[in-house]
Image: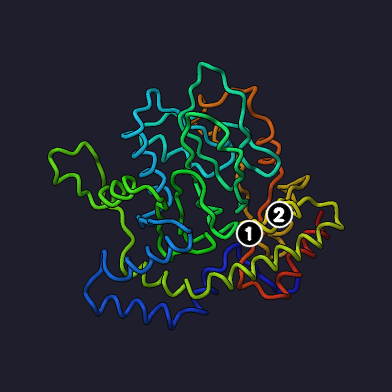
Amino acid sequence: MNGLKIPFTGLQRQYNNLRTEILDATDTVLRSGNLMSGEYTDQFESWLAKKNHSLHAITCHSGTQALEIIASFWKQYGLYDPAIVLIPALTYVATANAWRRAGWTIAIADTDSYGLMSLPKMSKDIKIRAICPVGLYGHALSNKYYDWENTIFVEDAAQHWLSRDCERMGLASAISFDPTKNFNNYSNGGAVVTNDEILNAFARNWIRNRSCHDSSSAQTGTNSRMSEVDCAQMMVKTRYIDAWQTRRGEIARHWMEQLSHSGIRSLIDATNYQDHCYHKFVIDVDHRDQLHQALADLGIETKIHYQDPIQDLNPYQECAAPDMLGSCYALSRRCLSLPIYPELTDLEVEYVIDSVISCV
């Protein structure tokens, strides 16, 4: 044992590096006494809209609630009956939960070997009204999801929004600032990104319960905002996100090159590297669980994203036809996420990949 302990995320290291700036920003907000919906919220939303080449960014409590806001908007104004949304089998369960909470019926599609949603040949009796692909692990989405007629296209961009120069697709995107994400808030946070003026107004009402004071409105809502402290801290991180992404890309490229000689498949490869945002570095291996334990014994924390496809979770077992799913199971049984974050030292980068290769 060489004594190296490599956690899955670099949250503690990131905070230690930014501690003075984070504490200064926090102190400035608290001394002002303005804790909600102030200048830092405005600054962060403006930065986020510009970063995503969009007109509007509306911050809220989480990426899940951002997606629920979008789903609620289209349920109310789309006039779809039945309201059925197609989501991928491999994603965090929040994707399904957000749409179901907004009143939609879930349909589940298989994924390809990269974990991206495949577009099935659906029965004519199943009328899909919305498609919600997920850029799993940070993989950019393709234009193929536009091919379905009479459907709305919504991005669950929680994992991939920084890919391909933040190029947005579809009618709206849900972004997450969960602590595990590339661009993270220390508590939580999310945002709706859109060019649609009506959705912008709907979302701003939804996050402030504003419709409750309008007797003529049928819209419901809640209290779902990022605080001024959250937004001030995120503005500190805007100074560093590009450098962080560059470092992630350097680590991913090095690991790709090392693995190319080992026979181990990486889900970041020459076909998608340029457009990826390196949210997760996932490998596809035999005996995944044994490798997971072997790396833990060497002090390297790894994760499995995701061990159970959505249709295997109790609330969604009725949502997929058995003959439509297969590839997602192969990947869910073989995928392993390695720790990747900009605070990894060069020594740790080498130790992780050398350990993987030697243990397989």
Residue 102, image quadrant: top left
Q: Residue under circle 2?
A: 268
Work out whether 325 lies above or below 19: above
Q: 44 left or right of 159?
A: left
**Mark 2, residues whose alpha carbon is within 10 Å: few (<14), some, or many (≥20)?**
many
Q: 76 left or right of 188?
A: left
Does dot 1 land on a helix, a strand or a loop?
loop
Residue 298, x across and y down, in percent? 72, 64
Work out whether 84 lies above or below 112: above
Amino acid type at mark 2 = Ile
Q: Is residue 83 visible?
A: yes
Q: 174 left or right of 303?
A: left
Q: Residue at x 30, y 80 (%)?
A: 28
Which colour scheme appears in the figure?
Answer: rainbow
Q: Residue under circle 1?
A: 278
Does dot 2 land on a helix, a strand or a loop?
loop
Work out whether 86 lies above or below 27: above
Q: Residue at x 51, y 26 (%)?
A: 319
> Label 1 near label 2: C-beta < 8 Å?
yes
Q: Is residue 315 visible?
A: no
Q: CA distance from mark 2 to mark 1?
A: 8 Å
Residue 116, x across and y down, in percent? 63, 42
Residue 26, x across and y down, in percent? 34, 76
